[in-house]
Image (cartoon, rainbow, N blue to C red):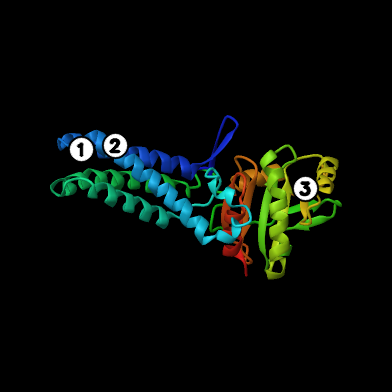
Amino acid sequence: MPDAVQIGPFLIATVRLVLLTGLLVASWWAARVARRAGLDANWVTNTAGNLAIAGLLGARLGFVLLNWDGYQANPITALYVWQPGYLPWAGVMGGMAYGLWALSRRVRSERLAYARPLLMGFVVGGAWFALGYGSMGLRLGDGAAVKIGDQVPEIRLVNLEGQPVTLWSLRGKAVVLNFWATWCPPCRREMPLLDSVQAEFKDRGLVVVGVNLNEAPQTVAAYTRQVGVSYPIWRDAPVGQSGFDRTSALYARFGGVGLPTTLFITPDGTLRGRLIGELNRGALLSNVRAVLP
């Protein structure tokens, strides 16, 4: 299953779709159990929905607090909930806290009865999410696809000057491999962020590499000069030149379904993480720290 789904102009992470459907299943199942028990199904439905919202807010808040240095310069980005950055255990705690508070507002004799449909609903919803999330790790017919935990294959491209470059030459360093294009607005917006993180962590063994997706060399060179990024940009070798990979094929092999796509590779060449869509500083720093030597 791909890491993201393209719906019109929108790129939505698959895990978010699975989570959303899991929460809907939880709410539906909780109301179903409540109706069968002769309880107030509307109260259960509303409480389950609010519990889910509390969980999502808790997960976001937990991640922001744990990675505050990635948000303190521009705190408003913490509210960009469409960007990556959620802490699951904080979400569970937030949801549980709201659920206990909501139950405490009912008379004591009803609390256990109303706790049962909520608990059963979220057990079923959690099972739905676990099944969907687990299926994301399946290769689904493409044994050549690279998934999290795999060793990253060699990559042979050229840099802006047309000189051959290889990924394995960076072994021993943590690598952030960012697939991008000049026509992609989120790609352009995140390039200064990638550049600043490269400068901040290069002495600790980090290398950021931008892999331009299938554009003309003069277009790539002109845009990178305009932006002024300091990290290396790799691109396709001239058509017909043997011994090199094509960026479009690499993008597909690494599970690309939308731009930007960013890979986080450990010094021993293991794919540690993959984010599809625009980065924020908090999520970027969290993944970078996970691969540093």
Q: CA distance from mark 2 to mark 1?
A: 9 Å
Q: Identify the residue position indicated by label 2 in the image.
A: 45
Circle 2 crowding by C-alpha within 10 Å: few under 14, some 14–19, many from 20: many
* Mark in the foreground, 3 or 1: 1
Residue at 56% across, 55% down: 273
Q: Secondary structure at mark 1?
A: helix
Q: Amino acid at mark 3?
A: Arg
Task: Measuring from the top left, give residue 25's x and y in whole percent.
Answer: 33, 38
Task: Measuring from the top left, give residue 16's x and y in whole percent.
Answer: 47, 43
Residue 235 is tagged as: 3
Q: Pick out the residue farthest to the left.
A: 109
Q: Is residue 268 above or below residue 32?
A: below
Q: Earlier in the sequence, mark 3 or mark 2?
A: 2
* Residue 26 in view, yes or no: no
Task: Measuring from the top left, give residue 82's x and y in whole percent.
Answer: 54, 43
Q: Amino acid at mark 2?
A: Thr
Circle 1 crowding by C-alpha within 10 Å: few under 14, some 14–19, many from 20: many
Residue 49 is tagged as: none
Q: Amino acid at mark 1?
A: Ala
* Residue 78 in view, yes or no: yes
